Amino acid sequence: MLVMWRNMIECYTEIRINNVEFRNLIKSHKYEEYILNIINKSCEIFGGKTFKIVLSQSHGESDFVDNNGIKYDAKLLFTTKQGQLIGDKKNDISDWIKSMIEERGEFAKSIEESNVEETKLYKIIKERIESLEEDENGILFIPFPIVNDVEGSIFLQFATDFLQAIYDRLKAKKIIKRRRIYFIYPGMEPHVYVLRCGNGRREYIRSPELQDFITFSTDIDT
């Protein structure tokens, strides 16, 4: 399935998605293997660390552990309804994409009205962080370009984006505590995923392995 939309900075984003394979990726939790691949490719944010999947998770164990024994849990940034839209075989996933585009568009209004806490994404991230154990760090994965992000952009050096505004509010409200929170989402270049710390530091990692499920590319309107 092919979907295109015009986003907030005068550019077009194209999504190509294999409905069946993408649905299976999410439902089977196989996405954890791809998250592991991305964080093990990190040379900057996780430089020097090696991660492995915790094989036994029958008692709520973390998803990953690094070579220092530090625990990390992966969380999808979907609402229950969004998960149902993906899981329903009668749905071609277009409704999920529409839902994500609407969620993405909440940022401008939230900044204008100073109510980021009322956005769907804030509530999802808050819930996921609060579900972490005190000694777990969070890796929050969203297979959708929820913010505009491209390596080397001068604009991004100064912009407060959706994720940063949410993280800063959660930190101010002491919800994050001593945990380290990381985000992974698609960048604006094909096959590039952004690995990002809560403080905004970014690393751009090529992950063509996900192209069999979903791909994104963005063209700036000149």
Image (cartoon, rainbow, N blue to C red):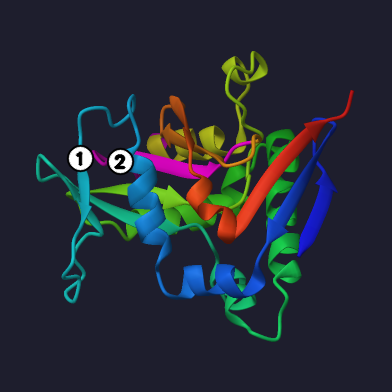
Residue at (64, 51) in percent of width and height: 215
- Structural distance between the alpha carbons of marks 1 and 2: 6 Å
- Labelled pair 1, 2 in contact (Cβ < 8 Å): yes
Classify 10 Å Cα crowding around label 1: few (below 14), some (14-19), many (20 and above).
some
Judge left or right: residue 191 versus residue 61.
right
For this orientation, the residue located farthest to the right is 222
In the image, residue 127 lies at what x, y percent? 42, 59
Instruction: Name the residue beneath numbered marker 1.
Output: 50
Name which quarter of the figure residue 81 lies in: bottom right
In the image, residue 114 lies at what x, y percent? 66, 37
The tally of labels here is 2
In the image, residue 207 lies at what x, y percent? 48, 43
Residue 140 image label? none
Part of the protein shown in magenta:
172-187
Rendered-image quadrant of the C terminus: top right
Residue at (71, 56) in percent of width and height: 16
In the image, residue 107 lies at what x, y percent? 69, 41
Looking at the image, tell me whether mark 1 or mark 2 is earlier in sequence order.
Answer: 2
Instruction: Name the residue type under label 1.
Output: Thr
Instruction: Name the residue beneath numbered marker 2.
Output: 40
Judge left or right: residue 62 versus residue 153.
left
